[in-house]
Image (cartoon, rainbow, N blue to C red):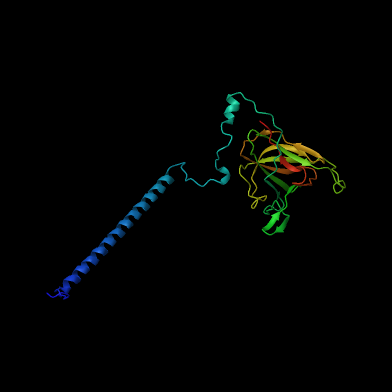
Amino acid sequence: MAVGEYVVLSQNESQVDHEQKEAELHLVQKKSSLILWAIGIIAACSLLDFVSLAYIASVPGLKLSTALPFDKLQFLSSYSHLDDVYTTEGIKASPRDPIINLPHVLAQVDSSAPANVQYPYPKMFSAHGGMIPFDERRTIVTPQISTVAEFHVMDYGMENCSLVLTIPPATNDTTSWMFDEAILLDVWALSWDQSIDTGRLSWNTKPQRGEHLGTLTMSFDTTQQIPTYSCKMGTYQNFEISCRTGPCNLQVFGNGDVDAVGMSFGPLAG
């Protein structure tokens, strides 16, 4: 054979076509088997889920778990085991003066407009980033309007608490009218242990009243408080202040530039 010459080999074209078709058919069958296996696995998992849900529904008292609200999530206290030191070692805590705790929420609800939401900061000013509320705490009580106050107990060992109402001295605007009869304000603990959503707070949606904690007298230049009670660190304390008797017309406004007038919270050392 001369160098560089090619020899044509004889081939059976029909045989080549047959082999190609067999290879394609084998590939299709393999893909079909995989699809059938996948469908079978999905059907088995779905059946297992259905049986599990049916079993859970049939067991009395067994409920599906739901997401906990943020306020209900447990957190690791940085004061762990200090209780053991004070109780078992006989060590007494150092005396501490009361702490003035300003409210997280101080908003009004109106029985004459039970569906209306009164936002806690009606006065705002416009800034580059949007509308910013003035730091103005409003304590208002009338025969129709109650004030809802929320406080958060955050200090370890300061777990004897009392709600405090401070009414400033009379001014030229207030001396024109005086109290002809005693005006009494009721303080209620609200049956709610989470933070209050002020965006939905109205007379219809406010938490129910729980224990009656005390009665305060509306009088100028006074600071009054209800009896102290135990308040656990990390809890929310929610109150409602309402009119009991007399021509209630309490409107006290406080801000960060003056003393804590209006509603405040006094955690004391335990």
Q: Quadrant of the C terminus?
A: top right
Indicate the quadrant where residue 178 lies: top right
Q: Which residue is outermost to the front?
A: 3
* Residue 229 position within the rendered picture, expressed as x and y whole percent measured from the top left: 67, 33
- 227 or 25, nearer to the observer: 25
Name which residue lies at 39% across and 47% down: 52
Horizontally, is 63 left or right of 110 in the view? Answer: left
Indicate the quadrant where residue 33 lies: bottom left
* Residue 49 position within the rendered picture, expressed as x and y whole percent measured from the top left: 39, 50
* Residue 77 position within the rendered picture, expressed as x and y whole percent measured from the top left: 57, 37
Q: Which residue is outermost to the left?
A: 1
- 53 or 40, nearer to the observer: 40
State how many labels appear: 0
Q: Can you say whether 230 is above or below 60 in the image?
A: above
Name which residue lies at 58% across and 27% down: 85
Name which residue lies at 30% across and 56% down: 37
